Image (cartoon, rainbow, N blue to C red):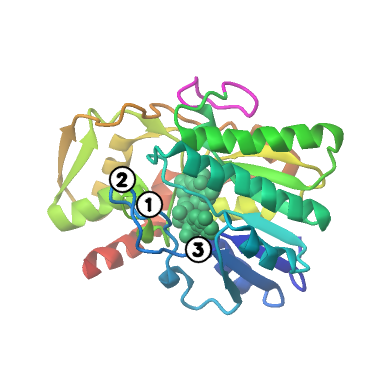
Amino acid sequence: MDFNYKTIVITGGAGFIGSNLAMYLQEHYPSARIIIFDKFRTGEKFESGNFTSLGHFKNLIGFKGEIITGDINFKEDLKKIAQIDFDILYHHAAISDTTVMDQKLVMQTNYQAFLDILEIVLQKNAKMVYASSAGTYGNTKAPNIVGVGENPENVYGFSKLMMDMSVRSLLKNNPELPIVGLRFFNVYGEREFYKGKTASMILQLGLQALKEKKVRLFEFGEQRRDFVYIKDVILANILAASAKKGGIYNVGSGIARSYNDIVAYLKEVLGDFDVEYIPNPYKFFQTHTQADITEFYQDLGYQPKFDLKTGILSYIAEIKEIAKGL
Ligand SMILES: NC(=O)c1ccc[n+]([C@@H]2O[C@H](COP(=O)([O-])OP(=O)(O)OC[C@H]3O[C@@H](n4cnc5c(N)ncnc54)[C@H](O)[C@@H]3O)[C@@H](O)[C@H]2O)c1
C-alpha cells in the first residue's frame, strides 16, 4: 500500500513497536501525515517497580509528524482521535507488561479502550491494524495456530484474546471489514531500551554480557520462544494495511529458539562470558512458543527476513551503544 498522502494514526507511538513504525513510515512515505497518540511515561510505577506506561520521547527523536498526548482510557482524549480524518489507525497502545496483576486496569486499558477506538474506526470506515499477542496461547502446544489452543495464562493474554474475540464476532457478519489483528511473538530490536525490565531477553542478556561478563538464565535455558526481529514486525504492520478483508495473524519468525541459543549467538559476536542458571520466580512462563505463519504468508505474503542469528547481528551495534551509556 502507498501511504503517501494518507493520514495515519499510531496509538502507542512513543513505545517500542509504535515508534519504529512511525519512523519507518516517515522515511519511506515522506508525504504521509503521521499522528502519534501516546500517554508517554508519567513516573508512576507498578509494585514490580516497572513504569505503568513505557513510552519515551527519546524513541521519537527525529520524528517530524504530529503528537497528541493522551490516555486511551479517557473518552475526552479519544475525541481528539475522532476529530481526525484518518485513513488507517495502528493501535499499539497497551499495558505491554505481562507481569501486571491488576486485572481491572489491564482489561480497561487493553480491552475496553480498544473497543472505544474500534468504534471510532468503524464510524469512519477506516482501516485498523492492532496489536494482539502470542500471550493469547498461554502454554498450549506449539506451533501456535490462530483459532487453536487459545488459553491465556495471565490477564494480559486474556485482554488480547478478548480483543481478537470481539473482532472475530464482528468479522463473522462483515468479513470484508479491514480490521487486522497481529499476534506478535517475542519482539526484539532497536528502540526497546525504554521498556526496562520488560525489554527482550536479547537486549537484557547482551547488556549483562557486556557490563558484567556474566548472564543469568532461568534454569536451564532450554525454554523455547519464537523471537522475532523488529524489522520483520514492521514489515508485518505494513503488509497488514493492504488487507482486503479482516483477519488475525501470527507475527513471528516461524522458528522457536532457546535462551541458550541467544547466549551462543551473543558469544559469537561479543566473545566468551559466564552463564549462571537461576530458579524461575514466575509461576506463569511460556515454555514453548512458535508462530505458525502460513496463513499470513498465504493471505498477505508475510515472509520474515531475519532469523535469530541475523537479527542479533543487525541489532548488536545498538546494544553496544546502550551498554556504553550505562
Ligand atoms: N514487544 C513485544 O514483544 C510484544 C509482543 C506481543 C504483543 N505486543 C503488543 O504490541 C504493542 C506494542 O508493544 P511495545 O513492545 O511497543 O510496548 P511499549 O510498552 O513499548 O509501547 C506501548 C505504548 O503505549 C503507551 N500507552 C500505554 N498505556 C497507554 C494509555 N493508557 N494511553 C495511551 N498510551 C498508552 C505507552 O506509553 C507506550 O508508548 C502492545 O499492544 C503490546 O501489548 C508486544
The quarter holding residue 288 reads top left
Whether ligand 1 has any atom under 8 Å from the Cβ at mark 2 is answered as: no
What label does residue 312 carry, if any?
Answer: 1
| Image-based side of 288 in relation to 273, left or right | right
Q: Position of residue 31 (x, y in %)?
A: 72, 77
What label does residue 222 carry, if any?
Answer: none
Question: Majority secondary structure of the magenta segment?
Answer: loop
Q: Secondary structure at mark 3?
A: loop
Residue 272 or residue 40, whichever sits in front: 40
The Cα–Cα distance between marks 1 and 3, rounded to whole angstroms, is 30 Å
- Label 3 Cα neighbours within 10 Å, binned few <14 / some 14-19 / many ≥20: many
Callout 2 touching callout 1 (CB < 8 Å): yes
Quadrant of the drawing holding the N terminus: bottom right
Looking at the rendered structure, the kind of residue marked 1 is Ile
The Cα–Cα distance between marks 2 and 1, rounded to whole angstroms, is 7 Å
Is residue 273 highlighted in magenta?
A: no
Q: Position of residue 138 (x, y in %)?
A: 48, 27
Mark closer to the chain start, 2 or 1: 2
Residue 297 or residue 134, whichever sits in front: 134
Whether ligand 1 has any atom under 8 Å from the Cβ at mark 3 is answered as: yes
Residue under pointer 3: 39
Q: Residue at x 67, y 77 (%)?
A: 30
Q: Is 14 placed above or below 244 here?
A: below
Q: Secondary structure at mark 1?
A: helix
- Label 2 Cα neighbours within 10 Å, binned few <14 / some 14-19 / many ≥20: some
Looking at the rendered structure, the kind of residue marked 3 is Lys
- For the record, the magenta segment spans 138-149
